[in-house]
Image (cartoon, rainbow, N blue to C red):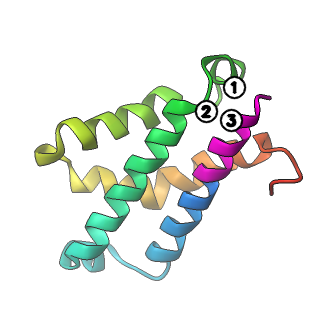
């Protein structure tokens, strides 16, 4: 594994942990009524996509179990079509998809990082 890949994977885990802390105990109503929460979560999802985009193509190819293109595509959608970000999708990502994604990423990080 390239050193940079390990750094980006670790960053993804750190960001995911931040998301998990912010959604813990929150409902969809909390999300809908709290603009700051929506902004922060959307930004963190975007940043995870940016880190995933920087993981080497070789590493991505070696780990097809990780939905790299979906993660990176979400980042592109937030950045380039920011006025049309679907908050239903953001909520689904942070509450349902992220935990599954993290289960796939965490084992890929060298043990001295985790």
Question: How many discs appear?
Answer: 3
- Would residue 37 be found to the left or right of residue 54 on screen? left
At a point 35% along the width and 77% down the height, the residue shown is: 27
The answer, for residue 91, to whether it is visible in the render is: no
Say if 95 sits above or below 64 in the image.
below
**Magenta span dominant secondary structure:** helix
Give x and y (percent) for residue 48: 48, 47
- The residue tagged 3 is 4
The answer, for residue 92, to whether it is visible in the render is: yes
* Badge 3: residue crowd in 10 Å (few <14, some 14–19, many ≥20): few
* Badge 2: residue crowd in 10 Å (few <14, some 14–19, many ≥20): some
- The residue tagged 2 is 66
At a point 26% along the width and 37% down the height, the residue shown is: 77
**Residue placed furthest toward the left:** 83
Residue 15 sits in which quadrant? bottom right
**Residue placed furthest toward the right:** 112
User: Dots 2 and 1: beta carbons under 8 Å?
Assistant: yes
- Would residue 19 be found to the left or right of residue 105 on screen? left
Instruction: Indicate which disc residue 63 carries.
Output: 1
The stretch drawn in magenta includes residue 5: yes
Give the magenta-colored segment's residue range.
1-12
Residue 92 sits in which quadrant? bottom left
Task: Kindly report the distance in space between the C-alpha atoms of the residues bearing marks 3 and 2.
Answer: 18 Å
């Amino acid at each position: 594994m390239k050193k940079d890949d390990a750094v980006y994977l670790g960053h993804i885990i750190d960001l995911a942990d931040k998301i998990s802390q912010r959604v813990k105990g929150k409902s969809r109503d909390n999300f809908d009524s709290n603009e700051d929460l929506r902004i922060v979560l959307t930004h963190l999802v975007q940043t995870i996509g940016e880190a995933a985009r920087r993981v080497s193509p070789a590493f991505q190819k070696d780990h097809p179990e990780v939905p790299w293109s979906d993660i990176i595509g979400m980042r592109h959608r937030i950045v380039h079509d920011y006025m049309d970000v679907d908050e239903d999708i953001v909520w689904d990502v942070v509450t349902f998809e992220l935990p599954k994604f993290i289960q796939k990423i965490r084992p890929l990080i060298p043990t001295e990082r985790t």
